[in-house]
Image: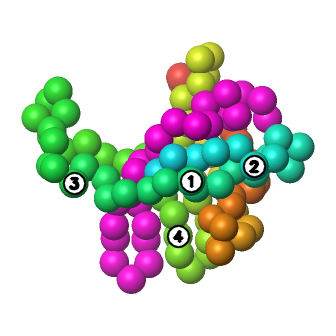
């Protein structure tokens, strides 16, 4: 689990799917290493100014939050690998997520 927490503290972009679709940029902070939990400490609308990437396209989000289930999935890059992660919203009031699973992504 240490690989995941080496990347926490930076911003992550995610899409909220529920009554429509919205994109947000969020900052995560570690709540507990032993319980593998993080808290959403800040969030804002993603790409509010309409910036384009190096290919003159609108950047996209890798994360997805499903409001009906409280499940959050995202791909997180560490110094040594790419991880596909699944989280559960365990405290909606304080916006705390718990890591359910992760899988290292490898090239085929």
Q: Is residue 52 above or below residue 45?
A: above
Q: Which residue is the extreme one toward the top?
A: 80
Going from N to C along the chain, the mark reached first, 4 or 1, is: 1
Q: What residue is drawn where x is 15% and y is 38%?
A: 52
Residue underneath mark 4:
66
Horizontally, residue 50 falls left or right of residue 46, namely left
Q: Residues within 10 Å of mark 1 (few under 14, many from 20)?
A: some
Q: CA distance from mark 4 to mark 1?
A: 19 Å
Q: Nearer the viewer, mark 3 or mark 1?
A: 1
Residue underneath mark 3:
48
Horizontally, residue 6 falls left or right of residue 41, namely right
Q: Residues within 10 Å of mark 4 (few under 14, many from 20)?
A: some
Magenta segment boundaries in residue numbering: 1-25
Q: Residue 14: where, in percent of width, then height?
A: 44, 54
Q: Residues within 10 Å of mark 3 (few under 14, many from 20)?
A: few
Q: Which residue is the extreme one toward the left?
A: 56
Q: Residue 66: where, in percent of width, then height?
A: 52, 70
Task: Identify the secondary structure beneath mark 1.
Answer: strand
Q: What residue is drawn where x is 61% and y is 31%?
A: 7
Q: Is residue 19 magenta?
A: yes
On the image, which quarter does residue 100 sit in?
bottom right
Residue underneath mark 2:
31
Q: What residue is drawn where x is 81% and y is 47%?
A: 32
Q: Is residue 31 magenta?
A: no
């Amino acid at each position: 689990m240490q690989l995941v927490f080496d990347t926490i503290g930076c911003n992550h972009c995610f899409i909220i799917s529920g009554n429509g679709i919205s994109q947000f940029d969020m900052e995560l902070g570690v709540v507990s290493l032993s319980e593998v939990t993080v808290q959403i400490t800040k969030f804002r609308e993603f790409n509010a100014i309409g910036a384009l990437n190096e290919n003159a396209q609108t950047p996209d989000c890798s994360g997805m939050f499903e409001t009906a289930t409280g499940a959050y999935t995202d791909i997180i890059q560490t110094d040594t690998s790419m991880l596909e992660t699944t989280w559960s919203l365990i405290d909606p009031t304080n916006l705390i997520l718990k890591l359910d699973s992760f899988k290292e992504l490898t090239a085929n």
